[in-house]
Image (cartoon, rainbow, N blue to C red):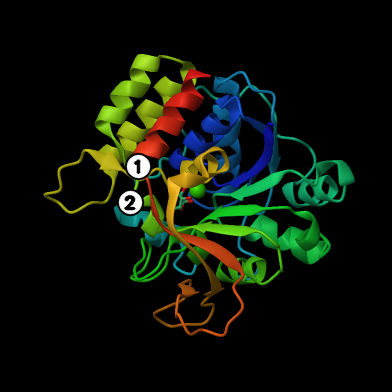
Amino acid sequence: MTIRLIIDCDTGTDDAVAIMAAVCHSELELVAVTTVNGNVPLSNTTENSLRVLDHLGSRVGVYAGAPRPIMRPDFPIPRDVLNGDEPAFQIPYLDLPASKTSVQEQGAVSYLIDYYMDDANLDTVLVATGPLTNVALALAAEPRLASRIPQLVLMGGSRGWGNVTAVAEFNIWVDPEAAESVLGAGIRDVTVVPLNATHSAQITLEDCDLFDAIGTPAAIASSQIIRQRILNYPDAPDAVKRSAPVHDAICIAYLVRPDVLEDVGRYRVHVETTGTHTLGEMVIDTRLWSDSVPNARVALRANAQIFSAFLSDAFRD
Ligand code: RIB
Ligand code: CA
């Protein structure tokens, strides 16, 4: 039974690997890609998504979405300040040939609404691997989507630490109001893949050697992208750079291999939208005695071997 999905993303490097796995895996059918401001500006995330799909000869449509968060004019710390010290990590354009395919005329938010208001599409999983601005806007414009999107899998958040501030993960931090709104919308099946999971299932240089040996366009491109991530990952100065998290692709692996996620629990999840030091923090209520009603399944660990094997299987297809 083929699993249909839409990826809403801010293509960057790990989003690119997620798209390639979704296009190539025989058990998956990528219906569309919707793009959002995030890793890089919207025009870049859109061009990068087009480049990845062109690289694979895929005719999947790309729909451009929000160029900025729903309430804020920019990131809580403006992008040029935030990225000032790590320009090499998220490169503006993926190292693939410029796109030949054009972005769709219809916008991402309108597309998501039209798609899920069609009863023929109520099997399609929505996978969000960037800030949740598009998803929040679609839910605000058409609240019935909350009961029509069958499953949302999102890469974002963390428990206990962050990658953009001491407590906040990038996707959630970029647009905390959007994240809180999506988590509170009432979508019946939400799975959160936070940094705790993605950092526990890193892809290694040895995995990249395996991908190179597979030799398909997706395998070779993903190996190159992941090697660049390993080389540039902001790690401890003396760290032995042999692996890096490939956050977004774990969301795709989960659709085919749910056992890739471990230490999974159902919890009430909120996002801080006003904290001075905690803005964008994902608050996961794991108290055993909590009387809060869970709104998401959260994985606090992932399995590196299953993740790597999933990518190899996808790239071989
Ligand atoms: O914090 C990691 C997430 O932020 C990933 O989705 C990465 O692509 C960026 O969007
Ligand atoms: Ca992303």
Seen in the image, is 251 located left or right of residue 146? left
From the viewer's side, name the closer residue of 138 and 43.
Answer: 138
**Depicted 160 relative to depicted 261: above or below:** below
Q: Which mark is residue 31?
A: none
**Depicted 255 relative to depicted 109: above or below:** above
From the viewer's side, name the closer residue of 313 and 154.
Answer: 313
* Residue 75 visible somewhere in the drawing: no
Seen in the image, is 250 located left or right of residue 70? left
Seen in the image, is 57 located left or right of residue 210? right
From the viewer's side, name the closer residue of 132 and 270.
Answer: 270
State the separation of the CA atoms marked 1 and 2: 7 Å
User: Quarter of the image holding residue 166?
Assistant: bottom left
From the viewer's side, name the closer residue of 66 and 161.
Answer: 161
Residue 270, horizontal then vertical, whole percent? 55, 75
Q: Earlier in the sequence, mark 1 or mark 2?
A: 2
Q: Amino acid under label 1?
A: Ala
Residue at 81% across, 52% down: 113
Residue at 61% across, 48% down: 127
Residue 177, horizontal then vertical, whole percent? 60, 71
Residue 174, horizontal then vertical, whole percent? 51, 63
| Label 1 element class | helix
**Depicted 148 relative to depicted 111: above or below:** below
Q: Which mark is residue 304?
A: 1
| Label 2 element class | loop
Which residue lies under the disc numbered 2?
Answer: 200
User: Quarter of the image holding residue 135?
Assistant: bottom right
Seen in the image, is 100 located left or right of residue 41? right
Residue at 14% across, 51% down: 237
- Assess whether mark 2 and mark 1 are in contact (beta carbons under 8 angstroms): yes
Q: Amino acid under label 2?
A: Ser
